[in-house]
Image: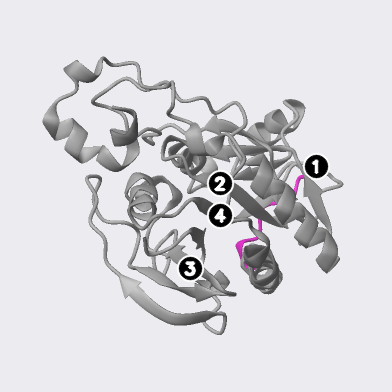
Amino acid sequence: MEAEIAIIGGTGVYDPEAFEDAKEIQIDTPFGKPSDSIIVGTFEGRKVAFLPRHGRGHVYSPTHVPYRANIFALKKLGVKRIISVAAVGSLKEEIKPLDIVIPSQIYDRTKFRVSTFFEDIVVHVGVADPFCPELSKIAAEVIDELGYRYHLGGTYVCIEGPQFSTKAESETYRKLGFDIIGMTAVPEAKLAREAEICYVTIATVTDYDVWRGEPVDVAMVIENAKKNEEKVRKILRKLIPRIPEERRCECKDALKYAITTDPSRISRDVKEKLGILISKYL
């Protein structure tokens, strides 16, 4: 095992002062290479991996992030919990720019992304609650202690991107009761569940989307994202030592009854390809 906890986020979230004995690891997966090399080191006494979601220099758009390779690579490293950091827009007046949201639900509006590792066998994984409730609760407690404005719960609608919403789309999402809008929670959360990895999103609000009648100002989004990054670094320093080693949530056993294909019909190649995900159940 190289790491027990992973952080996925922008390069601005990476805190070199917090990592000790950091090293970069290149990993190959059956689904290609991850977004970038993964930095692994000791962070506040825990073995932590950091993966820049869009690659250094922000080279992958939300649609083309190699999500399966990213999650599979973290699984290979031994990761059991993922803390995702993502910039989002607000769909509600009370959720203000620079607020933080720990969402509890996802609504998928993407069109071109593969959301499963299991194309060669049938595996029905439950994702009724896509974010780990145990990890979400701890994250909310830490944010509250730090005194930042935050919202626990709510629905993250994930759009394809890279374009922002039209006004009609933004208004529709509001009428459907969604709280925040972003471009990366799907398929990350679903793949993490298939990999039996706990997953939480620390969503940092940068703007009000376009439902207020104002265009999304990219310069303002970038400025607010940078302001939020300092908050996130402080949250991570306090959150990671607080995470218990033992997992009591259902995430750790997500595949226990999910594999539907008869094991005798699963080829040796597939067993080898997906071994780190399914071998303990075959």
- Circle 2 or circle 4, nearest the eye: 2
Instruction: Report the amino acid beneath label 3.
Output: Lys
Q: Which of these two is toward me, 266 or 158?
A: 266
Return the residue at label 4. 84
Mark toward the start of the polypeptide (4 vs 1): 4
The disc labelled 2 sits on which kind of residue?
Tyr
Q: Earlier in the sequence, mark 2 or mark 4?
A: 4
Question: How far separated are the C-alphas under marks 4 and 1?
Answer: 22 Å
Q: Secondary structure at mark 3?
A: strand
Dominant SS of magenta comes to: loop
Magenta stretch bounds: 213-219
Q: Is residue 248 above or below residue 97?
A: above
Label at residue 47? 3
Q: Residues within 10 Å of mark 4 (few under 14, many from 20)?
A: many
Give the alpha-carbon distance from disc 3 to disc 1, as whole Å.
37 Å
Disc 4 element: strand
Q: Nearer the viewer, mark 4 or mark 1?
A: 4
Residue annotated with mark 1: 92
Give the residue number, with chain letter if any, for mark 2.
Answer: 199
Foreground mark, 3 or 1, reads 3
